[in-house]
Structure formats: C-alpha cells, structure tokens
Image: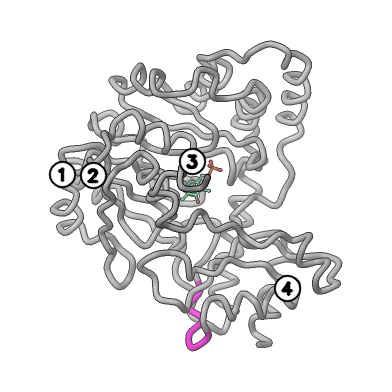
Amino acid sequence: MERLVRSCYKKKSGYVFAKKAEDIAREYGIGRIARLASNENPEPPSPAAREAAEQALLTVNRYPDERVNILMYALREHYGDYHFVTGVGMDGVIETIIRTLVEPGEKVAVSTPTFSFYTLAAMGQGAEVVTIPREADFSVDTKTLIRMAQEAKITILCSPNNPTGNATPPGTVAEILEGIEGVLFLDNAYVEFSDYDYIPLMKKHENLILGRTFSKVYSLAGLRIGYAFVPRWLVPWYQRASTPFTVNSVSAAAAAVALRDKDHAQRYIAQVKRWRERIAAEVKFPVLPSDANFVMIDVAPCRSDEMVENLVRKGVVVRSCRSFAGLEDHYIRVSIGEDWENERFIKEINAL
Ligand SMILES: *Cc1c(COP(=O)(O)O)cnc(C)c1O
C-alpha cells in the first residue's frame, strides 16, 4: 500500500531528532545525562505558567478560542500594537504560512546551512526549494541571496541561525526586504539571546514575518506553541489556511502567562551569555561566535557523528551537524544547559 504515499516524502529523509536521554542512560548505564542537543531551557516552566495550564485543563471539554485572544492580548501587552498569528510551535506557523502563500511548483528560497524543517515543509506543499549558500564565515551573501530569491514567494532566513549561531544585522535584513519581490520569513527562534532587535522593521516593511517560539527561552517546548509578527494583510488569509482550532487552550493559557514572567526568561538569558564565553574560552576546539543559546564547534579532524558518539559514552548528548545540508562534516552543536551539564561537557570534550 505504500505506493499510495506522496513521492515528496519518499525522496528525502525526514526531520532528524536528538538521541533520547533515557535510551542512552539505559544503554551505557549512566545515571544522569547532560542534555545539550535540543536547545531547550533546562529550567522547568514558570510556576505561574504551570498554574495557568492547570486551570485551563478544567475546561478542555470545550473547544478552544479560535482567535487565541488570551495570547493575543498578552503579546500586545508585551510588544505593543502589532499583528500576530499563532500555531503549533513555530514549525506549525511555518507550515501554515507556506500553505497560505505558495502554490505547488512555486519557489521557496532558503539561506543555508540552516534548520531543516523549512525545506521539509516547503516540499510537503509541493514547492520548489532554492537553496542559497552563506559565505565561508556563515554570514549572508546579500547580493547573491537577493538575486537567487527574486522569483521566490517566500525567502527564509534564520537569525540567529541554527546551527551556526551567528545573527544577521537588521540593516542587512532591511536590504533584503527591499531587494526581493516576495515575503521574508525571518526565523527568530533564538532572538531573545541576541542583542539585535528586528521588530522596528515591521513598521516599515509589508513583506516581513518574524517567527517566534515558546519552546526555547520560555521552557514550553512540550506544549508546542509558536507565533509570528505578521503584516496586517496576511492575518485573515493565514486564518483561512489554518486548521479550525489550531492552538489548544492549555498551551495558549500557559504561553500568555510565561510571557509575563520576565525573571524566568532573564535567568536563562544570563546563564547563556555567561556560558557562551566560558565555553569559547575553555574548549580546546574552535568555538564559533554565537548569538543563540547554543554554540557550534569545529571538531576537525574528528567527524561530527564520531564526536557525538564519543560524548554520548560519557553521558553528554550534543547534536551532530552532519544532517545540515551545505555544512562540512566536522561540526557539533552544543546547547547551553545547567552549570553541571556545561561543566561536564567541557571536561569530557577536552579529555578526548
Ligand atoms: C526550535 C526551532 C524552531 C521552532 O520550534 P517550535 O518548537 O516548533 O516552536 C524554529 N526554528 C528554529 C531555527 C528552531 O531552532
């Protein structure tokens, strides 16, 4: 019966998930695993967000608010008078935006190496994916990007970029916005860890979308909730392309409250900034500069998978960058975790 499955899913491998800590613990008999592969905030969510989720559970016999007003109010309170859409993770937002704008056969341009889901989502909608390589130092080659993205409905740029960690200056983003015909989706999953502010660009450009998530700094990865700043014209069309009740009421309630707990976010942001420096100073391999809550490390002459396997044996899970198309096979990506996790990582990688 598998002949019935669409060819776009057969010709490419799917999303690559991190190894499960529980499996590693069992396989190697290690009690505590340092989980540094998925860029999560190691701290549990804000207690107020947890309480809001528990309250919301009491009424899950009812369908959620399709307008997600509880979260829309919180977003406007937090950021000001902008237009937002929400989704099942930022991944859900990306998929819905592609569905809203891209006809089968039309182009989606992606600046690479980067997060793999853009390509998977675009192919799932029958789009043609145009990949535009970054420079050797992973900065964006603006001229080439504008030229190659000319015919694309959507151009996708990740800043700070996963997995390289570097961010693109707002001035460069403005140049791209003016140079392309279509929409720019700027993936800001890690923007809270950077000093760049892209929000002022929303007022000047009708073709900018800023994708955001509650999965990283807000400790809500398991609730699957994301959002985006969008131009006003897009809102009703996004809603038309969405499933009718996309965001569940528990996630919406928790996210609205999480946004207000500034101390929770600030604690992890401070932890990230402190440890980015320590890791760069103490690890014996070259650590690339990062504006995110992870660092990419050049482990040559070791290969990515080999280094990951060596660290897993020591109870440290990091991400191999082998599966990021357009990247040479000698990088790993390491999230900033709790103190003991980061310390163990530095000790074990330096001992290899
Ligand atoms: C984690 C991540 C996301 C979104 O994650 P969700 O959990 O779906 O909100 C989006 N883009 C990048 C680059 C990411 O690393």
Residue positioned 49% across, 35% down in the render: 92
Q: Secondary structure at mark 1?
A: loop
Q: Is residue 271 left or right of residue 44?
A: left
The reply to whether discs 1 and 2 touch (Cβ–Cβ < 8 Å) is yes
What label sits on residue 107 in the rendered view? 2
Q: Nearer the viewer, mark 3 or mark 4?
A: 3
Residue furthest to the front in view is 1
Residue positioned 48% across, 70% down in the render: 322
Per the rendered image, the range of residues in magenta is: 297-302
Q: Position of residue 79 (x, y in %)?
A: 46, 28
- The relative height of residue 88 versus residue 273 in the rendered view (above or below) is above
Which residue in the structure is indicated by mark 1? 151
- The relative height of residue 83 versus residue 108 in the rendered view (above or below) is above
Q: Secondary structure at mark 3?
A: helix
Distance between the alpha carbons at the discs numbered 1 and 3: 24 Å
Sequence-wise, the earlier of marks 2 and 3 is: 3
Q: Amino acid at mark 2?
A: Lys
Tell me where residue 228 sits by quadrant.
Answer: top left
Which residue in the structure is indicated by mark 3? 91
Residue positioned 44% across, 25% down in the render: 85
Kindly tell me whether mark 3's CB lies below 8 Å from ligand 1: yes
| Label 4 crowd (10 A; few <14 / some 14-19 / many >=20) | some
Kindly tell me whether mark 2's CB lies below 8 Å from ligand 1: no
Which residue in the structure is indicated by mark 4? 344
